[in-house]
Amino acid sequence: MSTPLLEVRDLHVWFGLRKGRVHALRGLDLTLTAGEGLGLVGESGCGKTTAILAMMGLLPPTATLSGEVLFNGENILAKGEVSVRRHRWTDLAMVFQGAMNAFSPVATIGDQIAEPMRLYGVADGKAATRRVHELLELVGIHPDRARRYPHEFSGGMRQRAAIAMALACGPKVLLADEPTTALDVIVQAQVLDLLDRLRAELGLAVVLVTHDLPVVGRVCGRAAVMYAGRVAESAPIGDLHRDSRHPYSRALFAAGEGHFIPGTPPRLDEEPPGCSFAPRCSLTEDRCRTETPPLLSLSSGHDSACHLAASLSGGTA
Ligand SMILES: Nc1ncnc2c1ncn2[C@@H]1O[C@H](COP(=O)(O)OP(=O)(O)OP(=O)(O)O)[C@@H](O)[C@H]1O
């Protein structure tokens, strides 16, 4: 196996509240090699955005964290902002949720894509303009459009431009937060195909955050299904489809086919013992309410945090 480009080890995040705190991320481990796509999947509130903001060092000041984020073996969180700043945008970049609506209306798309290059000393003047044109071509936009304003772009084109902007400083890892939400199905497919092409052609490692499991397979070979701040199951996409070993992943697949998951995810300011999914799970046994199931390896690359994982086999739901 090739050396990991990005490794996340036992990452925890807490958000301070006026009373108490929320334990939003509860020990995340991820590994990613160059050119690999990994989906982070789960319902709203399970910690997906928190995880990638932590990797970028962009959590709000109310957050505290522990754990490591290793880029090429170096812990980029070791010295807080000082160490993470050296890697942000140049090694790890992010497409924010709603990025396509976050462009300034008063500057051209080209100037906005060039801005991070100037800020991070990657390119200036004519070199920056040349690079903007290359980036636009890379994401399937005619370079002439660099002089246009955001309102002259369709939603899909603005999302492509947001991806071009994230790539401005030549990162090796792209963290994309719900990049296809609010786009129609055809445009969604085009944006996913673009991410897949960038992954393959540039050897970009892509973390794709989504609540939509079927979306993941278009870009990612593997997915980590998250629930209540933890990974519930992590496996190659094919195994997740054919042989899911966690009732929550099965419920998510069924939800994709229109079956509602009863109940809601738990509050994260409390930490009751047992499996966080137990109150919503149809297979719950006594020990599920008392013992937190660890994430264990079932076979190469397939991990599950369910006490019943070994007895769950054959298909979904
Ligand atoms: N700034 C904050 N202050 C307090 N709690 C927060 C903050 N940001 C997130 N949280 C809490 O952390 C938990 C994880 O949120 P997060 O946004 O990471 O989930 P998510 O899976 O990305 O959901 P979504 O898809 O809705 O963005 C939630 O319980 C959320 O309420």
Image (spheres, rainbow, N blue to C red):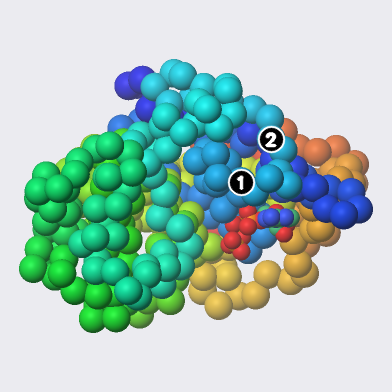
Label 2: state its secondary structure. strand
Res 303 quadrant in image: top right
Between 241 and 185, the one nearer to me in the picture: 185
Q: Quadrant of ligand 1?
A: bottom right
Q: Which amino acid does the dot numbered 1 rest on?
A: Leu
| Percent position of residue 182, x then y | 43, 76
* Mark 1 residue's CB less than 8 Å from ligand 1: yes
Query: Residue under circle 2?
Result: 65
Residue 179 visible in the snapshot:
yes
Query: Residue under circle 1?
Result: 59
Please give the name of the residue rendered at 41% of the width and 32% of the height, measured from the top-left corner: 87
Q: Which amino acid does the dot numbered 2 rest on?
A: Leu
Res 259 quadrant in image: bottom right
Is residue 232 positioned above or below 43 on the image?
Answer: above
Spatial CA span between label 1 and label 2: 9 Å
Label 1: state its secondary structure. loop
